[in-house]
Image: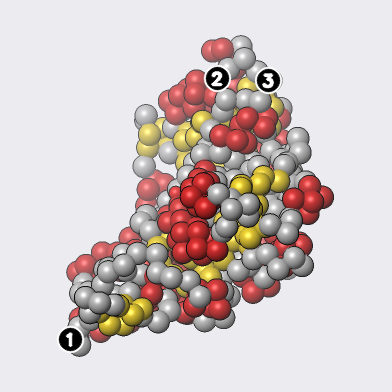
Amino acid sequence: MGTETLKAFDVQRVRADFPILRRQVHGRPLVYLDNAATTQKPRVVLDALSRYYTDQNANVHRGVHHLSEIATAAYDGARTKVRRFFNAASDREIIFTRNATESINLVAQAYARPKLQAGDEVLISAMEHHSNIVPWQMACAERGAHLRVAPIDDRGELLLDEFERLLSERTRLVAITHMSNALGTVNPVAEIVRLAHGRNVPVLLDGSQAAYHMPVDVQALGADFYVATGHKLYGPTGIGVLYGRESLLEGMPPFLGGGDMIASVTFEKSTWNELPYKFEAGTPHIEGAIGLGTAIDYMQSVGLDEMAAHEQQLLAYGTTLLEAIPGVRMIGTARRKASILSFVMEGIHPHDIGTIVDREGVAIRTGHHCAQPVMERFGIPATARASLAMYNTREELDALGVALRKVVEVFG
Ligand SMILES: *Cc1c(COP(=O)(O)O)cnc(C)c1O
C-alpha cells in the first residue's frame, strides 16, 4: 500500500456521503462509535433502495415481463458483486440470507445436523458471538454430539496449540470468528483452516466483523463456509450472505422449503432447484440484496486497503487516548486486532459510562456484546465498547475522551 493511496483517503469526503452523520444528538454533533453493532449507510445505498421501489419493483425469477426482468437482473447482479467482493469461484456459491445468524443456522441445520452422530464434535472458540455458539449447541444437542471450545489468553488471542489439540478424530466441523466483535481480535484464520483441513475437517468462518474492515478472499483463506451480514457492510438490514464451497452446498438438503427453491413439485415428491436458489425459499429481500451490492461498490470505490489503514491509525490513536484516562483498562489487547476499543473503568458500571457519554452525543455500546462467555473469561459483567468505521475521525475519539473524563468526574 503506497503513501499515495493513503493520502487519497479523505475522511471528510467519506463523511459527506453519510447523511446521518450530519445530525445532532442531545444538541451535540453525533459521534457514532457503535459500528460493530451496525454501520451507517452512504447516500448511494439509500438512493438504490428508493430507486428500486420507484423504478424497478417486481418479483424476481418468475415473470417474463419487463420489470421482473429488470428486478431479476439487479438481484442476480448484486450476487455477482458479492461473489467478486469475497472472491468466491462462482455465483452458485453465494446464498442470500437474512443475516449472519441465519447463514450460520443454515449450515448448522443443513450441513452439520444430518452429519453429526452421537459422540461427534463441533469445535468453536471462546470468543464467539452467540450466533456462532447457539446454532451449534442446538444441532449438537439434537444429535448427541459435543461442542468443544478452544480457549483464549488474557490478551484475547486464540491459543492455537490448544485449538490444535482439540481437533480430534471426532471433530466434524470448526466454526470460528474471523474477527471478534467483543475484543477486536483478528484470528489467524488461514492457519486455522490449514490445521483443520490437515484433519479433513471443514471450517466455517464468521466474517460478520472482518468483512467490513479488511479485504476477504475466501479462496485464499481456504474457507469452506464464510458468513457476513449486510447491515455491517454499510448495507441494509435483513440481508445476509453465506458463501459455501459448491461441492459442500451440492450435498446439502434445503434449509427451508417453499417457492423458488424447487425444480418441480407434486404431492408425492418435490425436487430441488439448482444452486444458489435451492437455499433461497420464497420471495427474497430483493432491495436488500441490491442495496448490499451498492454498499460493496461504495466500499470498493473508497478502497478497502485505504479504509483499513485509516481504521488502524484510529485504533492506535484511540488506544493511547483511552489508556491515558484514569481507571481505564482495555479488554482485548491482541497483537492483531481491528477497530474495536473495548474497556472497563475502575469502579464504574459500563452502563453508567454509556449513559453519560450519550448525553455528550457519543454513541458507544455497553453490555456483553452478545458474547457472554467472553465476559466470563475476563471476569467482568460487561464492557464499554467504542467501535470504528471508515467515517470516524480522531476528533470524534477526542470527543469520546472528553466525555469519559466527565464520567471520571461524576463517579471518580
Ligand atoms: C454482528 C455479529 C453477528 C450476528 O450478525 P447478525 O446480523 O445479527 O446476524 C455474528 N457474529 C459476529 C462476530 C458479529 O459481530
Mark nearer the N terminus (2 vs 1): 1
Q: Which residue is mark 2?
A: 349
Q: Check if mark 2's residue and mark 1's residue have beta carbons within 8 Å.
A: no
Q: Residues within 10 Å of mark 3 (few under 14, many from 20)?
A: some
Residue 105 seen in this snapshot: yes
Position of 264 relative to 111 (above/below): below
What amino acid is at disc 1?
A: His
SS at circle 3:
loop
Position of 208 relative to 273 (above/below): above
What amino acid is at disc 2?
A: His
Residue 4 seen in this snapshot: no
Q: Which mark is residue 327?
A: 3
Q: Residues within 10 Å of mark 2 (few under 14, many from 20)?
A: some
Give the Cα separation between the discs numbered 2 and 1.
Answer: 59 Å
State left or right for residue 107 relative to residue 169: left
Q: Which residue is mark 1?
A: 65
Position of 68 relative to 218 (above/below): below
Position of 286 relative to 390 (above/below): below
